[in-house]
C-alpha cells in the first residue's frame, strides 16, 4: 500500500476547490459543523454547507470576481467563515484571511498588498476597520458582511444573487482550477515587521491534507473536533479542511474564550487542536493540591500503562491495580475536564513542558506536539500516542525532508512548502534556497529522527560576554506557573538577562483572594507577596541553567499583553521588538538597580 493510501474514506481531490462538493457526495447528511446559537448547539450538514458555499461562489461570479483574484475574509471563527472560504475556492479566486483582532492599519496592509477585490467582514466592528482605510485600497470593489448592515452587501443577499447564476458556471470554474493555482495567501503574524503573504497552491494544501490523513488523527464522521483557534490561522484552516476531507464534524467554540473548558465538557470532542496555554491551565487546575513527587509517580505509572497498551502488550496486575487507584483519584477527573471522550489533542505554536505532556499522556489524554510554519501548509513533524518522545516535536511527516544547516537552522523540503511571499521576491529568495525552505528555527535531529526545537535565530540573545542565549527556554519554564501569562527575556549586549512578566488574572485572582489580597492586576503587580511568589517560580527555572544564562532580575507589568495593544500577534505570539521598545524604561531600570 502506498504511504498516502489507507482504507479510511476521504475526498482524495486534486484541488481544495473540489473538496466540499466531493465531501457532500460522501458524507451528505452527516454533520459538518456544530455551532452554538442562543445557548443551544446546532448542526450544519455537509450537504447544507456545500449548498451555502456554492451559492457564495456563484454570488462572487455575479459580482464579477474572476479566477485568481483575491477575496479576503475578516472575521472570527464561525460557520459562515468556512462556507465563504470554500465558496471563494470554488469560484477559482484566492482566499486572503485576516484576523478579526487586526487593527485598521494591519487590515489596510493586507488588503492592499494582496490586491483584494472584495472583503467579507464579520460585522459592524470589522466593517468600520475597512471603512477607515478604504481610501488606501484602490483595488477593493466589494465589501460584504456576515451580519446584516446598511453599509455593505449581506452574505445572504450575495447568496440570493448567486442563485440567479447557473450552477454549471460554478462547476466550470471549479473544474478549471489546477493544482498549481493559488489557493490562499496567509499573512504571517509580523513579529518583527509588516506581515508577509505566504502563497500556497492547491497542491501544497492538498499535500498537507494527505499527511494528516496518513497520520489518522481524524477517524471520520464518528469523531468530533472542537475548534476555538481563529480560522485565519494556517493551522486552524488546515484542520478544518482536514475534517472536511474525511467527514469529521467540527464544533466551533461559542466566541467566549473564558468558556472554552466548559464547552469541552458540553460537546465532548474526540480531537482537540490547541495552543499550550489551554493545557497549562487545565494542568494547574487539576494538579493544584498534588505534590511534585506524587505527580512524578503518577506520570511514571500511567505512562508505563499506556505505553504497554499502545504496544498491544499485557499490563502486569500490580501495575494495573496501581493505575486503577490513580485513575479513580486523579486521572478520571482530568479526562472529564475534556468531556471524557478525548482520544488525542494536538499542541502547537509554542513549546509546552515535557512534564505536562507526560502527565496528560499518563491520564489517558495524550497531548501530542507537532511543528510547522505558515510557509509549510502547517505540518512538518508530528508525534503520535504510539510513537512519541516528549521534549521533541516528533518526526517528519511522509513526503517531507528535514536537514540541519551548519548554523543549526532547520531546513525543510516537500510538496507542502509554499511557493513564495506575495509581492516580495527578496524575502522569497532568502527563504527558498535551492529547493529548501530556511525556517529560521534552530534545532537538532536525534538518531531516531525526532526533531527538537531550541528557538528562533532572530530571537537569540548575545550577552556582553558573548554568551548565546535562547529566550524561549527559560520563558517557557517560567510560564509553567498558572499565575504567569507571558514572560519576555531581554539582555542583548547586556551583561546578564532580565525578565518582564505579566500576570494571568483568571488564575492569580483566586490565589490572591484566599490570602486576602486585592485581585486587580495593577495592584497585585506591585504587591510583595506576588513578587515573592514569582521569585520562587524564577528560582526554580534558573536552577536548570548555567550561571551566565540565569535571569538576574525581573519586573511585573501592571497589565497583560494583548493583540489589541500590539504586543501580541493575532496568533498570540509576543512581538519582541514592540515589547523591547515600549518597555525600554522598565528594562533599563532593572539594570540601573545594580
Image (cartoon, helix red, strand yellow):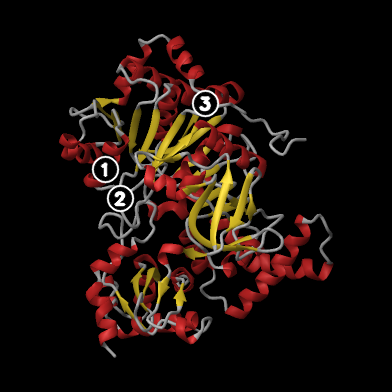
In the depicted structure, whether residue 162 falls above or below residue 566: above
Furthest-front residue in view? 434
Q: Residue at x 45, y 28 (%)?
A: 86
Q: Earlier in the sequence, mark 2 or mark 1?
A: 1
Q: Is residue 564 or residue 506 the one in the foreground? A: 564
Image x and y of residue 589, in percent:
24, 82
Please tell me how many numbered marks the rendered image carries: 3
Left or right: residue 31 versus residue 91 is right
Crowding near the residue tagged with mark 3, few <14, some 14–19, many ≥20 C-alpha atoms within 10 Å: many
Q: CA distance from mark 2 to mark 3?
A: 33 Å
Mark 3 and mark 1 residues within 8 Å of each other at the beta carbon: no
In the rendered image, the quadrant that contains the N terminus is top right
Dot 1 corresponds to which residue? 109
* Residue at mark 2: 194
Label 1: which secondary element: helix
| Residue 324: image location, x then y, percent | 72, 65
Position of the C terminus by quadrant: bottom left
Given residues 247 and 494, the one toward you in this image is 494
Q: Is residue 309 visible?
A: yes
Q: Disc 2, disc 1: CB below 8 Å?
A: yes
Q: Is residue 531 left or right of residue 367?
A: left
Crowd class of label 2 (few under 14; some 14 to 19; many from 20; radius 10 Å)? few
Is tag 3's residue or tag 1's residue first in the polypeptide sequence? 3
Residue, x 66% and y 62% (percent of image)?
389
Residue 554 is labelled as none
Q: Quadrant of residue 152?
A: top left
Secondary element under disc 3, as helix, strand or loop, is helix
Alpha carbons under labels 2 and 1: distance apart = 8 Å
- Callout 1: few (<14), some (14-19), or many (20+) C-alpha neighbours within 10 Å? some
Q: CA distance from mark 3 to mark 1?
A: 30 Å
Which residue in the structure is indicated by mark 3?
A: 20
Q: Nearer the viewer, mark 2 or mark 3?
A: 2
Amino acid at each position: 500500500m502506498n504511504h498516502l493510501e489507507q482504507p479510511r474514506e476521504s475526498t482524495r481531490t486534486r484541488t481544495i476547490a473540489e473538496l466540499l462538493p466531493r465531501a457532500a457526495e460522501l458524507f451528505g447528511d452527516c454533520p459538518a459543523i456544530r455551532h452554538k446559537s442562543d445557548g443551544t448547539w446546532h448542526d450544519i450538514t455537509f450537504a447544507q454547507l456545500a449548498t451555502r458555499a456554492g451559492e457564495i461562489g456563484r454570488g462572487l461570479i455575479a459580482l464579477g470576481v474572476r479566477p485568481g483574484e483575491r477575496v479576503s475574509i475578516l472575521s472570527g471563527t464561525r460557520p459562515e467563515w468556512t462556507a465563504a472560504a470554500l465558496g471563494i475556492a470554488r469560484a477559482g479566486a484566492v482566499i486572503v484571511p485576516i484576523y478579526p483582532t487586526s487593527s485598521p492599519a494591519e487590515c489596510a496592509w493586507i488588503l492592499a498588498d494582496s490586491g483584494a477585490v472584495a472583503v467579507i467582514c464579520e460585522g459592524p466592528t470589522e466593517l468600520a476597520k475597512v471603512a477607515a482605510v478604504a481610501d488606501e485600497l484602490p483595488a477593493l470593489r466589494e465589501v460584504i458582511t456576515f451580519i446584516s448592515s446598511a453599509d455593505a452587501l449581506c452574505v445572504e443577499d450575495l447568496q440570493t444573487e448567486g442563485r440567479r447564476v447557473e450552477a454549471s458556471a460554478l462547476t466550470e470554474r471549479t473544474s478549471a482550477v489546477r493544482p498549481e493555482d493559488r489557493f490562499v495567501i496567509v499573512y504571517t503574524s509580523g513579529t518583527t515587521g509588516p506581515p508577509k503573504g505566504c502563497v500556497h497552491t492547491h497542491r501544497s494544501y492538498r499535500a498537507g491534507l494527505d499527511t494528516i490523513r496518513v497520520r489518522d488523527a481524524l477517524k471520520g464522521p464518528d469523531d468530533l473536533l472542537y475548534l476555538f483557534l481563529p480560522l485565519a490561522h494556517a493551522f486552524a484552516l488546515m484542520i478544518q479542511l482536514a475534517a472536511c476531507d474525511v467527514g469529521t464534524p467540527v464544533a466551533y467554540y461559542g466566541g467566549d474564550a473564558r468558556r472554552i473548558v466548559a464547552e469541552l465538557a458540553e460537546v465532548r470532542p474526540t480531537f482537540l487542536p490547541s495552543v499550550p496555554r489551554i493545557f497549562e491551565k487545565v494542568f494547574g487546575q487539576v494538579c493544584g493540591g498534588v505534590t511534585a513527587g506524587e505527580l512524578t509517580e503518577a506520570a511514571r505509572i500511567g505512562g508505563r500503562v499506556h505505553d504497554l497498551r499502545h504496544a498491544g502488550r499485557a499490563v502486569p496486575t500490580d501495575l494495573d491495580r496501581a493505575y486503577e487507584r490513580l485513575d479513580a483519584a486523579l486521572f478520571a477527573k482530568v479526562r472529564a475536564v475534556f468531556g471524557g471522550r478525548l482520544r488525542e489533542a494536538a499542541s502547537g505554536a509554542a513549546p509546552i513542558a515535557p512534564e505536562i505532556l507526560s502527565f496528560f499522556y499518563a491520564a489517558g489524554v495524550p497531548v501530542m506536539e507537532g511543528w510547522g510554519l505558515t510557509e509549510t501548509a502547517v505540518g512538518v513533524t508530528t508525534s503520535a500516542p504510539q510513537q512519541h518522545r516528549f521534549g521533541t516535536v516528533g518526526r517528519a511527516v511522509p513526503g517531507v525532508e528535514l536537514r540541519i544547516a551548519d548554523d543549526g537552522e532547520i531546513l525543510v523540503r516537500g510538496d507542502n512548502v509554499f511557493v513564495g511571499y506575495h509581492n516580495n521576491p527578496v524575502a522569497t529568495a532568502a527563504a527558498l534556497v535551492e529547493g529548501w525552505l530556511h525556517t529560521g528555527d534552530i534545532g537538532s535531529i536525534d538518531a531516531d529522527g525526532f526533531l527538537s526545537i531550541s528557538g528562533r535565530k532572530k530571537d537569540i540573545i548575545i550577552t556582553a560576554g558573548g554568551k548565546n542565549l535562547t529566550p524561549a527556554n527559560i520563558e517557557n519554564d517560567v510560564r509553567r506557573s498558572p499565575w504567569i501569562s507571558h514572560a519576555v527575556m531581554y539582555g542583548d549586549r547586556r551583561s546578564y538577562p532580565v525578565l518582564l512578566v505579566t500576570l494571568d488574572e483568571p488564575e492569580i485572582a483566586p490565589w490572591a483572594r484566599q490570602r486576602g489580597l486585592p485581585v486587580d492586576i495593577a495592584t497585585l503587580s506591585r504587591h510583595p507577596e506576588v513578587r515573592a511568589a514569582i521569585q520562587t517560580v524564577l528560582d526554580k527555572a534558573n536552577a536548570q541553567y548555567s550561571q551566565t544564562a540565569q535571569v538576574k532580575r525581573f519586573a511585573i507589568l501592571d497589565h497583560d499583553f494583548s493583540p489589541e495593544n500590539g504586543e501580541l500577534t493575532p496568533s498570540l505570539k509576543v512581538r519582541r521588538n514592540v515589547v523591547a521598545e515600549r518597555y525600554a524604561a522598565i528594562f533599563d531600570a532593572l539594570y540601573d538597580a545594580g
